[in-house]
Image (cartoon, rainbow, N blue to C red):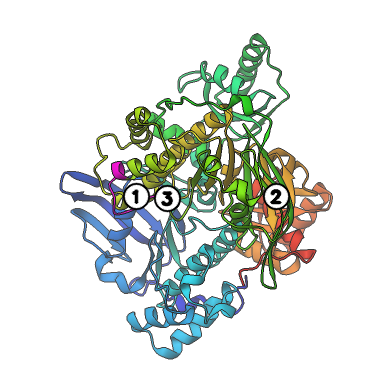
């Protein structure tokens, strides 16, 4: 992605009324929005400064979208004020860019036609539409797709096009409602790099996101719950308010350890919280030393060995979940009414592919991959858009015959066996794009899928009640499914996919757009299914979520480029991750990207992550000297730990250097 020739003067960010760039760009005071008896926004107060990236986080139904629509001038508040540059939001619509959650452009128009349409609608002169459109497309590395129909773009490219269209009218404020849902990690990082550039040049950005690793990239964030703003501060300030540390505990028997430690944890106890991941437990504690003693006592008493304990800082997700729980918002944890466990199958191969290759004419989408997923295992399939994940999954679940190679699924081998009715009854599938019928009620959808999957009549009512409880929709079974927010719809779709207790489960981005507490409920249930013997293949673009998998496979250009547990993949990365706290983050990032490989530098709010293959201390000293020689003050520098996103980007970029390209052509 290139930022060449970008000029913030086109965005018109100077406050013409006051000439003061330090005053607030957005002011919300005692804001209320009611829909009949429902209070969506309740007395919200908020200020966002010029050139600030401000994150709004909260669970489904928190009031985020209503707040955005008021600030965008789409609707009026019930009471209170919402001002942009000192004027009512409705009067400044021409200065506000707004990206909704749904792709709102025209799929039957080309990329350039969509840009021209939006520019004409906002009364931008034709020559300026053409000039800005070309410049922003080039910024997003999309200029070569100007003639492609928007409906044929990948999810990441659609979001980039939406942002281009929002920028063409020269907004002074940009409102982004979950802009990267469903976007792969590479595109997400590029998207946020551009947002950082725009903000550094004066554009004010308010963004809602369910991805808390993205919230880390904001200057400040606010937690919204039941229409009220609960906490506001920098990500570091919010994490520090927990007054806690996070202990990563590794043991061979995670399920047993989780059960034991959950029994001695709670908000008022020394061990505040326990969360299970694919190859570790995360234990949140006020006093890490006291917590380690408790962990050793409990594990020794149960005869369980501790392989390793590492103490680290809490994540923003820890803060989010802890705050919601203090407000009385707990995840639904109704036990699943399971009657058909698959424990006897554990360890056997449930999903297998040997030398799988798929060609479409001259194009090879998947190249000679080998994969084995065992019963009782959660396997994550990761890759950027165009990596071949979808094609691989379609072959593995029998929807697509491979050009070469062989598939094994639920004990059946070859195309005929994989597609047999007996195998189909053992498979559960949750698609990202299509899982439910929007024009049916929730109950009608559940009835339909219970019939399709052959759920026994005497189990159906019990299973339906469980889905409604898991989804937090008790008593709303007659609501039209299409009227549900995305997160709630995902919960119902997940419940529908597992009602028949499949022995093999395919989940395609199951928690896309789901808030962190609901995501925990998903993964608690997914882990229970795996503990009962179900084999689970998951795709996700949310790499903190990929940590939940026992093993991962990373794809690039149709090939596997890395495989192993989350810890294995991170630990195998060569070099070091350096973290710098600096006074001019964007200037520093631009400087380092000019002189080195761009992918090695990433901006997280006021912190800079740099991947180096050199000695850590020497690289830290030389980078500090380079920055300070260019007028950038380094406030702190330390050696950090690779995140899975860092590892993913590193693996993909190095695969590209070897000639393996994941293209969107």
Say which residue appears at 43% left-offset and 79% top-offset: 109
Which of the 4 quarters of the picture holds residue 283?
Answer: top right
Residue 171 marker: none
Neighbour class for label 1 at 10 Å: few (<14), some, many (≥20)?
few
Q: Relative to the observer, which residue lies in front, 432 or 619?
A: 432
**CB-based contact (under 8 Å), mark 2 and mark 1:** no
Residue 365 lies, with reference to residue 480, above or below; the image says below
Left or right: 284 in relation to 104: right
Residue 232 spot, x, y in % from top left: 41, 45
Q: In 3D space, how far apart are the residues under numbered discs 2 and 1 (Cα atoms)?
A: 33 Å
Q: Which residue is mark 1?
A: 485
Residue 490 spot, x, y in % from top left: 41, 46
Q: Which tag is nearer the camera, tag 2 or tag 3?
A: 3
**CB-based contact (under 8 Å), mark 1 and mark 3:** no
Q: From which residue to which does the magenta span run? A: 436-444
Residue 547 lies, with reference to residue 10, above or below; the image says above
Quarter the C terminus occupies: bottom right
Q: Earlier in the sequence, mark 1 or mark 3?
A: 3
> Which secondary structure, mark 3?
loop
Q: Which residue is mark 2?
A: 647
Q: Which tag is nearer the camera, tag 1 or tag 3?
A: 3
Q: Relative to the observer, which residue lies in front, 219 or 320?
A: 320
Identity of the residue furthest to the left in this view: 36
Left or right: 1 in relation to 499: right
> Which secondary structure, mark 1?
loop
Neighbour class for label 3 at 10 Å: few (<14), some, many (≥20)?
some
Q: Which tag is nearer the camera, tag 2 or tag 1?
A: 1
Q: Which residue is mark 3?
A: 435
> Which secondary structure, mark 2?
helix
Predominant secondary structure, magenta span: loop
């Amino acid at each position: 992605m290139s930022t060449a020739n970008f000029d913030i003067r086109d965005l018109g960010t100077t406050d013409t009324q006051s000439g003061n760039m330090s005053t607030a760009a957005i002011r919300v005071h005692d804001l209320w929005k009611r829909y009949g008896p429902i209070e969506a926004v309740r007395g919200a107060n908020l200020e966002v400064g010029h050139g600030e990236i401000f994150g709004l986080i909260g669970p489904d139904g928190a009031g985020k979208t209503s707040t955005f629509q008021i600030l965008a001038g789409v609707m009026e508040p019930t009471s209170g004020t919402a001002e942009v540059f000192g004027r009512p939001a409705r009067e400044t619509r021409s200065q506000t860019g707004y990206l909704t959650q749904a792709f709102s452009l025209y799929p039957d128009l080309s990329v350039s036609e969509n840009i021209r349409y939006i520019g004409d609608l906002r009364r931008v002169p034709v020559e300026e539409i053409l000039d800005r459109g070309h410049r922003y497309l080039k910024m997003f590395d999309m200029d070569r797709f100007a003639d492609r129909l928007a409906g044929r773009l990948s999810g990441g490219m659609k979001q980039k096009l939406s942002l281009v269209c929002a920028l063409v009218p020269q907004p002074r404020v940009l409102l982004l409602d979950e802009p990267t849902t469903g976007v792969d990690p590479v595109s997400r990082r590029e998207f946020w790099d551009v947002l950082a550039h725009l903000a550094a040049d004066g554009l004010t950005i308010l963004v809602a996101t369910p991805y808390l690793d993205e919230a880390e990239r904001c200057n400040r964030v606010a937690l919204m719950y039941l229409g009220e703003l609960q906490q506001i501060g920098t990500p570091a300030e919010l994490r520090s308010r927990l007054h806690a540390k996070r202990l990563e505990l590794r043991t061979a028997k995670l399920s047993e350890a989780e059960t034991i430690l959950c029994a001695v944890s709670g908000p008022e106890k020394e061990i505040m919280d326990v969360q299970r991941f694919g190859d570790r437990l995360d234990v949140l504690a006020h006093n890490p030393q006291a917590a380690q003693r408790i962990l050793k006592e409990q594990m020794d008493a149960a005869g369980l060995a501790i392989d390793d304990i590492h103490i680290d800082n809490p994540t923003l997700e820890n803060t989010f979940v802890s705050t919601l729980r203090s407000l009385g918002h707990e995840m639904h944890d109704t036990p699943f009414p399971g009657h058909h466990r698959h424990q006897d199958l554990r360890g056997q191969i449930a999903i297998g592919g040997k030398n799988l290759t798929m060609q479409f004419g001259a194009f090879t989408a998947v190249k000679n991959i080998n994969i084995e997923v065992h019963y009782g295992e959660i396997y994550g399939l990761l890759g950027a858009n165009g990596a071949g994940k979808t094609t691989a999954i379609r072959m593995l679940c029998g929807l697509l015959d491979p050009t070469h190679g062989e598939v094994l699924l639920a004990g059946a081998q070859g195309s005929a066996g994989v597609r047999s009715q007996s195998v189909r009854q053992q498979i559960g599938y949750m698609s990202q794009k299509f899982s439910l019928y929007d024009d049916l009620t929730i109950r009608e959808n559940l009835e339909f899928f219970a019939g399709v999957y052959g759920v026994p009549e005497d189990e159906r009512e019990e299973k339906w009640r469980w889905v409604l409880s898991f989804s937090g929709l008790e008593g709303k079974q007659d609501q039209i499914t299409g009227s549900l927010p995305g997160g709630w719809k995902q919960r119902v779709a997940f419940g529908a996919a597992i009602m028949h207790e499949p022995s093999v489960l395919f989940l395609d981005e199951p928690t896309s757009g789901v808030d962190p507490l609901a995501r925990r409920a998903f993964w608690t249930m997914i882990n229970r299914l795996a503990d009962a013997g179900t084999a689970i293949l998951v795709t996700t673009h949310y790499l903190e979520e990929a940590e939940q998998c026992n093993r991962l496979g990373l794809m690039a250009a149709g090939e596997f480029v890395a495989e192993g547990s989350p810890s294995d993949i991170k630990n195998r990365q060569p070099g070091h991750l350096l973290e710098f706290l600096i006074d001019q983050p964007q200037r520093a990032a631009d400087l380092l990207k000019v002189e080195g490989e761009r992918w090695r530098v990433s901006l997280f709010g006021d912190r800079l992550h740099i991947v180096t293959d050199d000695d850590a201390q020497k690289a830290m000293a030389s980078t500090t000297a380079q920055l300070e020689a260019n007028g950038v003050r380094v406030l702190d520098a330390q050696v950090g730990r690779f995140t899975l996103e860092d590892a993913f980007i590193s693996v993909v970029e190095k695969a590209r250097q070897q000639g393996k390209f994941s293209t969107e052509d």
